[in-house]
Image (tube, coloured by chain):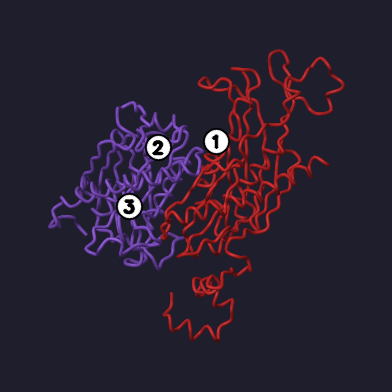
Amino acid sequence: MGLPNASEDLSSEMEVDAFRRLFPLRYFERHLAESIRPDARSLSRARNTTISMGAVASADGSALAKIGSTTMLAAIKMEVMTPSLESPDEGCVSIDFHMPPICSPLVRPGRPAEAAPVVAKQLSDTISSSGMINLKELSLVGGKAAWMVYLDIYCLDADGALFDAALLSAVAAFSNLQIPTVSLDDGKIVMLPEEQKEENSEKEPVNKEKRKLTLGGIPFSLTCILHKNYILADPTSEEESIMETLVTVVLDSSNQLVSLYKPGGAVLAYTSAVQDCIALTRQRVKELHQILEEAISGMEID
Amino acid sequence: MEVDRADGRNPNQLRPLACSCSILHRAHGSASWSQGDTKVLAAVYGPKAGTKKNENPEKASIEVIWKPRTGQIGKPEKEYEIILKRTLQSICILTINPNTTTSVIIQVVHDDGALLPCAINAACAALVDAGIPMKHLAVAICCCSAESGYCILDPTKLEEQKMKGFAYLVFPNSILSVLPEGSSLVQGEPMEHGIITSVTHGAMSVDDYFHCLERGRAASAKLSDFLRRSLQSKLPGDLSKAE
């Protein structure tokens, strides 16, 4: 870490960038003492968030979510399958999270990133815990045919708060999802392409009315870093690598706690810190809800 | 509010605990921990020289390998490995043996609910058995929250699946101190009330979660006592392990 005296002497002569690389913790602590972060955000403010729907034209539902520089592309493809025997009138959702080497210099080809399976599992746990998707809605013909929803999320730029951006893109993709029309053809389910609707009136679509999923409580999340007495909301990857204690709180729109995830970390979370994190998340849920509503209404106008 | 649990326990009662150390002779440290029917075996090898590519060579690093009882290793196992690794990294003193790797191998013997807390407790006992320097121990507990808002501790697998939500909580172990009470409070709370790790499943209200935290803290005090007693009974002059 360097002797305390050495950094004080060098800091007057060193350039800011060099000091940032050599003594990153001191660099950040100097900013935190003034209640600000190097990118001029206050401690409780999240980065600019944008959502754009329908980013992938060939997918049944897709969205691109950006929180600051962290970019996630989510795409949904639906397939008809036979449901399992234990749950004959339920469909299935399969979530996969990929971190290709484009997203970060730390991810090399051939070696999957450590964070990828963890975020994938966290996402599938969160989406099933929140009850956003009602699996019974995905059933087509009870016991014989149901939808299998494949949700793939690609991280295009990993700059901290990966889970937040991934969850936001997943939620936006589900909001954007248009279930393809299908019809029964000699006892088999067949996908109908859009243009055929007027010509063939013998092939009646089975699910003409249910084109969109009704979403239950939509989960939104916020990741915070705990460092000494400070709580930093929405960290960048540089902040995450220096101050390692992360807390992710997921709340849904009715303020139910869907998940509070703190995987170890040198700083212990006392009740006051947990309450502060939950309060910050509540504010963030309102912001994200509004951003999502604007993106949805933007798509509908088109 | 009274609740009927299938095995007749009351809501705050833990299952019978059993901990035995030094059961594997080749490992530098080993422990088996069982809570009722859930049993986990932990082995510690280390410190070994060298760190992996992405790890910081100025600190010791911990590597966790999680072996399920049956089946292949998939995403749930990788997630448990990362949670366990980060929890153990926060309790071990990493500056003492820089540029070394300590491997912790977890083998699930039987899973009947509260698997991750059982594994964390087993890993801590195994680290003590191996003599790895630590700041304090970690005690882990699982708390479930049901629809009506009551909270039960240490659920079995069936109870976990029926409940609205459950939380795995890890606290530092309780401190036996000669200082007067209240002199070592952090932010107005004793140190052992801080959460090291928290993983929740299922939606619950914020108040239910804080309720679970309180119950968890009370139970962690009992678990700390059990851990202290079972580790103290080991003979101090046991120098028969190589290296």
* Mark 1 surroundings within 10 Å by alpha-carbon count, few (fewer than 14), some (14 through 19), many (20 or more): some
Element assignment for label 3? strand
- In the rendering, which numbered label is found on residue B99? none
Quadrant, the C terminus of chain A: top right
Task: In the picture, one chain is purple; tell me its letter.
Answer: B
- In the rendering, which numbered label is found on residue A128? 1
Q: Is residue B237 left or right of residue A166?
A: left
Residue B64 x %, y %: 38, 50
Circle 3 chain: B
Residue depth check, mark 2 versus mark 1: number of the one nearer the observer = 2
Q: Is residue B56 above or below residue B68?
A: below
Q: Are marks 2 and 3 on the same chain?
A: yes
Q: Nearer the viewer, residue B144 or A190?
A: B144
Task: In the picture, one chain is red; tell me its letter.
Answer: A
Real-space CA distance between mark 2 and mark 1, rounded to the nearest whole angstrom: 21 Å
- In the rendering, which numbered label is found on residue B138? 3
Circle 1 chain: A
* Mark 3 surroundings within 10 Å by alpha-carbon count, few (fewer than 14), some (14 through 19), many (20 or more): many
Element assignment for label 2? strand
Kindly identify the amino acid type of the residue bearing the numbered disc 2.
Answer: Cys
Q: Is residue A189 above or below residue A180?
A: above
